[in-house]
Structures are given as structure tokens and as C-alpha cells.
Image (cartoon, grey):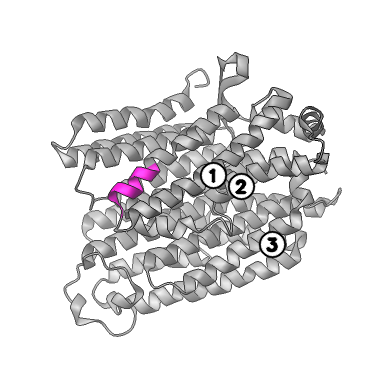
Amino acid sequence: MTNFPWITALTVLPVAGALLVLVLGERNKNLSRWTALTFSFIALALTLILWHSFDKTSGALQFQEWHNWVPAFGIQYHVGIDGLGLLMLLLTSIVVPIGMTASSQIQERTSVYYSLILLLQSCLFGTFTALNFFHWFLFWELSLIPAFFLIKVWGGSRSTKAATQFLVYTMVGGVGLLLSFLAIFLATHKSDFIDLAALAQSGQLMPAVIDKLAWHHITPQHLALLLFAGAFLGFAVKVPVFPFHTWLPAAYSEAPTGTTILLTGAMSKMGLYGFLRILLPIFWPQMQLVLTPLLWLSVATIVFSAYAALAQKDLKKILAYSSINHLGYCLLAIFAVVKFTGADTYLTAEKYAAMNGVFLQMFNHALTASALFWFVALLEKRSGGLRGLNDFGGLRKIVPVFAGLMGIALFSSLGLPGLNGFIGEFLIFKGTFPLTTWASSLAVLGLLVSALFILGIIQRVFSGPLNDKWLSLPDLSTSERVALVPAIGLMFALGLYPQLILAFVNSTAIQMVQHLKF
């Protein structure tokens, strides 16, 4: 098992699928679609093999592959996964088939559409497994290309503007990220995340950078903060963090729903993964220096996005702002973990809880948000493209199965106990309240406002008087019910038994917290 390059095989597999789908072309659209789906399920099977073979008692990197790539520039092909990486692989392997299934309305250039999805999946796999900056950054930036064309070519009437805004924002963030790590590489001649984290833990990283790169008019502390700001910008745009979020509502609403699922379910997690894999281990001293502003940013991300969702009338825009809100809780926990607590074992245990909550929230949000956007796609398909709150009403009387299953996903997003959305948020607040009471207390406002707009969706779409226009609206077909059952079943399974995930990520969460030297 350890000798086979499982991670490389998993990363290359979608590329092979994309090429095959392109060869099939437009001669048989259904064949292209089913071929792409088959490759996505093979990727899921390979991920489950990794999941089964993973040593969940260890927080160390596993399935590592290491080869010299460009030795003169310190660039290696170094891949591996711990509990976080494994979780991201599983998340991607689940979200991509959901996105493909929700794309049944795509009838033009079908083969190109599905091949771009497979290429995006390969970039996601590469991002979540690469451990050398230059190798990782290659996948990070390449992911923008298929995402841009998926939004622009198959999106709505304003898709060109939305795609361009998405590309410009994320590329600007990428430039800041690249400049910061180029400076670090020039000073240390290292680009491996593990090596850089070890230097940061021993307190040698920034002194080495300052010794080589310090400018006459910039103090060492300010230089270190400048490098942190560049890296932070790259990840903040991707999540996104307020106020770098303005590209997201347009991209999510204009993209075809299958693409929106990929954006919210997988690509947004690239930013959080960067916070956890790169920013936290390498820049934690700088994060500690600006902890209060970071906490304010997380609170603003949570609260303002919830109020923005409450003001929307378009279902996709409501869910877009809701996604920002839910990911804001992850930011709150990540920043709270940085707080200096000395040798207090109680607060250290709370940091473990908060970090486990982040991992769960990332996975649960991907599952729930993907399912909700999928339901919106099914509603659009039945209504001729309508998706406004005021376009419906009373639908539960004629589509009870649709209303019931979407209601489950909505209550999961609300954080109802017994469903997967509850336990992640519970662990986050359990950990962050003792660490930063004021920020956690303000963040609770986001939960309250979320309840308002989620219950508003249920009331205005499914309750009240039925519009005669929808008397013949069909309920979910048998095939649609079968396709939705796994996602709904996972919501219940993780809500009732979160150890399905926690057992695999707890060791990694503990190790991440312990590596922060206070």
C-alpha cells in the first residue's frame, strides 16, 4: 500500500478522464456526461481506499511521495496527507459528482464542460496534497482557469463580468501570496511547508528573513507583518473574508448551479486549507500580533454576510452569503487558537475542540451547501429558471418530497441538533467562548440572523397559499430521489455520529495546536 503512488494516481486520474471526455466530443452528450461521472466515482473509490488505509491515530503525514523536481531552486515534488488533507480529498471526491449531477441542464459544449470540471478536480487534489510551495502554487493558480471558463461560458447574462471579477480578485491575492513566499525562499532557500513550519516553530524563520531582506526604512517587525499580509491576502480572497468577498455573490449567482456547487463546496475550502496548512504554522507569531483585528474581521464576515443574506430575494444569492457566514465561524476558531494562553491545560483542550470544529464545519458546509444549491437547480429546472423568494409559495402541498428533503438540508444549514451542521458549530463555539468571549458573543448574532433567512426560505417557498401557476409542478423523480439519498443520509449520519470524521482528524487537530509555540 505504501509503495504505490496513490496521491499521484488520484491527481492524474481526472486529467485522463478530461482527455477522454474531450475525445468523445459532442457526438453523444450522455456518454460524455456518464464518462465524466464514472471518473469522478473512481476518484471517490480511490479516496475511500486512502481513508480505509489511513492511520487515524497518527497526526503525521502519510502516503508521502518525494522527488527532486528543480533542485537548483529547491523545488521538489513532495506530496502527502494528514487528517486535514484526507478530509479535503474526501470532500472534493463527494462534491464533484454532486456538481456534475446538478449540471444536467448543460446541453451546449457538454464534453468541454465536464472536462473542465475534471481538470478543476485534479487541481483541487493537487492543492490539498502538495507540500512544496512552488508545486502547491502551480495547482492553486491553475484551478482558476477551468473555474473562470465554467462561469463565463455556461453562466447567466452577466457571467462575463462575474467571471472576470472572480479571476482578478483571486489573481491579485495570488500575487501577494507569491511575493511573500518568494521573499521567504530568497532568505531561507526553502520552500517546503514542513521545513518552513519547523523554522517558524523554532523561532528561526523571521530572523533569517529579516537578516537577508531587511530594508533601511522598515523595522524587522513591520517587514514580518508585510510578508504575513501578502500571504493573508491570498487566502482571504479565496475564502472569502470580509471585505474581500464582493466577487462571490456575483460568481455564485451567475455560474451554472453545478459550477456554483464546486465553488462553494470545494474551492472556498482552498482558502481555509491555506489558513490551516500554511498561514497558521508559518505565520502564527504575526497572527498573534494582529489578533484583535483578525477577530474583528471574522466577526464582520459572520454577521455582515448573515444580514446581507437576509436582504436578498434570489435563492442563489441568499445561499451565497450564507456560505460566507458559515465559513466565518471557521475563521473565528482559527484566529482564536492563536491566542496566547500560557500553560493552561483547560484552554489548550478548548483549542483542540475549536480546531476539530473547524475541520467538521469545512466538511459539513461543503455537503450541506452543495445539496442546497442542487435543490435550487432542481427548482429552476421545474420552474423555467425562476429562483426568487416571491416566485413561489405553498409548494409543499404539491411537491412534499422535494419540500421535505430540502427542508432537511435547510435545517442542517441552520445547525439543528441531530443533523451534521450542528456539531461543527457547537465545537467551534465551545472552544472559542473561553478563548475570546467578546468575539464569540458577537458571532452569535450571525446564528440568529441565519435562522431568520433560512426560516424565511421555508415560509415563502414551501408554506402559505399555493400559486395556481405551480399546480402541475412535478415532485422529485425516482432517479432524483436516489441521487439525493446519499447526501441526506450523510447529514443524519454525521449529525448522530460525528466520530465518522472526528476519529480521522482529531490527531491532526491536536498536533496543529501543539506545534504553535507560545
Disc on the earlier residue, 2 or 3: 2
Q: Is residue 229 visible to the viewer in this orientation of the structure?
A: yes
Magenta stretch, main secondary structure, is helix
Q: Where is residue 512 in the image (x, y as percent from the top left)?
A: 69, 41
Mark 1: secondary structure: helix
Question: Which disc number belongs to residue 172?
Answer: 1
Note whether 413 is above or below 355 in the view shown: below
Question: Which disc number belongs to residue 189?
Answer: none
Kind of residue indicated by mark 1: Val
Kind of residue indicated by mark 3: Trp
Asked whether, in this view, residue 450 is left or right of residue 33, the answer is right
Q: Residue at x 22, y 42 (%)?
A: 110
Q: Which of marks 2 and 3 is in front?
A: 2
The residue singled out by tag 3 in the image is 296
Mark 2: secondary structure: helix
Q: Position of residue 89 (x, y in %)?
A: 48, 38
Disc on the earlier residue, 3 or 1: 1
The residue singled out by tag 2 in the image is 233
Q: Residue at x 50, y 76 (%)?
A: 452
Asked whether, in this view, residue 123 is left or right of residue 42, the answer is right
* 1 and 2 marks in contact (CB < 8 Å): yes
Note whether 381 is above or below 23 in the view shown: below
Q: Residues within 10 Å of mark 3 (few under 14, many from 20)?
A: some
Kind of residue indicated by mark 2: Leu
Residue span colored magenta = 147-155
Q: Residues within 10 Å of mark 1 (few under 14, many from 20)?
A: some
